[in-house]
Amino acid sequence: MRFASRTDAGHRLGQHLREQGIEADLVLGLPRGGVVVAAGVARALQRPLDVLIVRKIGHPWQREFAVGALAEPDVVIFDQTFQWKNPLARAELDGVIAEEKERLREYRRSFTALPCRCLKAK
């Protein structure tokens, strides 16, 4: 199925869920593109919208190589299949985690400062 935009996708998904009788107390969106989709779902279901901030934990020597993830409030998950054979890389990982935790907090602050307009009529 193709959509004109993320806004269109959220609207159509929300309509489908409503037609199927799906109920929810809250709709969560993941930044970046997921918040726009979730806003359409929240609007269609007439439910509040919130954001769940997550961050990738990149390998200290190749940051695009994901070895884990952070989520709110204090969730840290590692890829259990990855082997830390180099003790220097493992030691530097703590620094990467600290950086990403700070970015997660900053990101949360930026979303908290925004007013939620998802339920206002168009």
Image: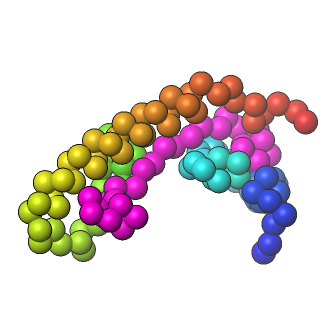
Q: Residue furthest left?
A: 87
In this view, the residue in front, 101 or 51, is 101
Q: Is residue 49 magenta?
A: yes
Quadrant housing the C terminus: top right
Q: Position of residue 57 (x, y in %)?
A: 34, 55
Q: Is residue 76 magenta?
A: no
Residue 18 shows up from this direction: no
Residue 115 shows up from this direction: yes
Q: Residue at x 17, y 61 (%)?
A: 89
Answer left or right for 108 relative to 116: left
- The quarter of the displayed image where residue 103 is located: top left
In this view, the residue in front, 61 or 36, is 61
Q: Position of residue 17 (x, y in %)?
A: 74, 56
Answer left or right for 11 relative to 88: right
Q: Position of residue 95 (x, y in %)?
A: 23, 46
Q: Residue at x 30, y 56 (%)?
A: 77
Q: Residue at x 36, y 49 (%)?
A: 70
Q: Residue at x 42, y 34 (%)?
A: 105
Quadrant housing the N terminus: bottom right
Answer left or right for 43 relative to 29: right
Q: Position of residue 40 (x, y in %)?
A: 76, 47
In this view, the residue in front, 94 or 118, is 94
Residues in magenta, as a range? 39-68
Above or below for 60 versus 81: above
Above or below for 19 versus 82: above
